[in-house]
Image (cartoon, rainbow, N blue to C red):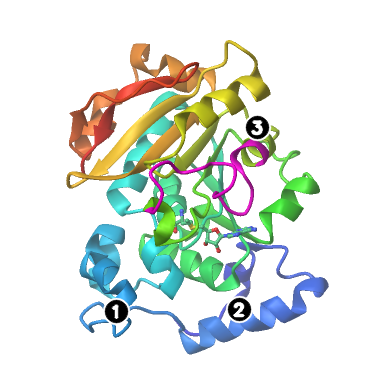
Amino acid sequence: MGRLNSSELEHFVHLGKRKYRRERRALKKLFRTNEHRVEPDVKVVDRTIFKYWKNRLTLFSRMRNRDIYMTRELWFSVTPESVAKFVARFIKSCLPEAKVVLDVYCGGGGNTIQLAQYFPKVYGVDNSLDHLYCAYRNAQAYGVEDRVWLKFGDWRVLSRKRRFEKVAVDCVFSSPPWGGPEYLRSEVYDLEAALQPQGLRETLAGLLRISENVVLFLPRNADLSQLSRVTRELLGEQALCKVLYVKQNGYMKGILCFWGARFYNYAGSTAEPSGAAQESSGVAEPCEVAPGADTLDYSVDG
Ligand SMILES: C[S@@+](CC[C@H](N)C(=O)[O-])C[C@H]1O[C@@H](n2cnc3c(N)ncnc32)[C@H](O)[C@@H]1O
């Protein structure tokens, strides 16, 4: 565990540069002090995260090996492992030849790690050094750290500076912050006003500049008509957005939204569709169809 060595530092893209001296020092300290390591058998004292702690093995199954790292925020924002696994396998089924995937807002690596099980190179971006550190530690726990490249920075800035547009990214996945556990307070989640740190339109426009294949993980009460409208505005009247409702143990975790022809044609694809869904015990379930959006009628149980 201990110190950050030079080959580990390479996986924190650009952090070896002079201008990141302060961040590099902070990162070294996190490694040295083994910060954020979870002791899975020790009950958390923070009552607001107890319910997440109770289900800790659904977040990272490797938690039982005592080598998972979490911040307080990560307890309620990490994508549960079965969901992350499903997404990664689904993308792999649709884009079997893809090599490079970008995970924007990668957090503690819930998605990054599962994507790295299927794709040789996965970039993760986050503006929290603590989260990037946890993502790297967690990738080590799953033995995929060599495939993971982490970029520290504010996505709005990186996107404005078009930082990833010259990288040959085959697919962009993103699980943006939903605004904390309060996202269910209103019946319908406003994808422009509530989604952080940018609304849906700006988020999607930025990601589509990097790849035509984009996947967003959004709240289950997201406004489908906004999805439909933004899809048409950005991609034309005939454009489609495929929506999958994702369940875990009977509980609706969120929706997965896909843009890109390879995802729409999935039903006709010969690549192992049900394998991906059945591994997480896929369950057919009717759902609403948003005008102009193509919503698929199944969800996933983990
Ligand atoms: C919902 S969490 C992502 C969880 C992740 N998929 C996982 O499984 O661990 C959202 C992440 O976005 C990051 N974030 C928030 N604002 C950001 C910004 N402006 N630029 C980059 N990252 C940001 C947060 O630090 C947080 O880690």
Q: Amino acid at mark 1?
A: Arg
Considering only vertical position in the picture, is 96 above or below 100? above
Residue position for label 1: 47
In this rendering, the label closer to the viewer, 3 or 2: 3
User: How far apart in space, not on screen, are marks 1 and 2 (Cα)?
Assistant: 28 Å
Work out whether mark 1 precedes mark 2 in sequence or the reverse, and give the earlier one.
2
Where is residue 212 drawn, in percent x and y?
61, 27
Work out whether mark 3 precedes mark 2 in sequence or the reverse, and give the earlier one.
2
User: How far apart in space, not on screen, are marks 1 and 3 (Cα)?
Assistant: 40 Å
In this rendering, the label closer to the viewer, 1 or 2: 1
Q: Amino acid at mark 2?
A: Leu
Where is residue 225 drawn, in percent x and y?
49, 27
Q: Amino acid at mark 3?
A: Leu
Q: Indicate the quadrant of ligand 1 in the picture.
A: bottom right
Residue position for label 2: 27
Residue 229 visible in the shown view: yes
Q: Nearer the viewer, residue 105 or 253?
A: 253
What range of the chain is rendered magenta?
A: 185-202
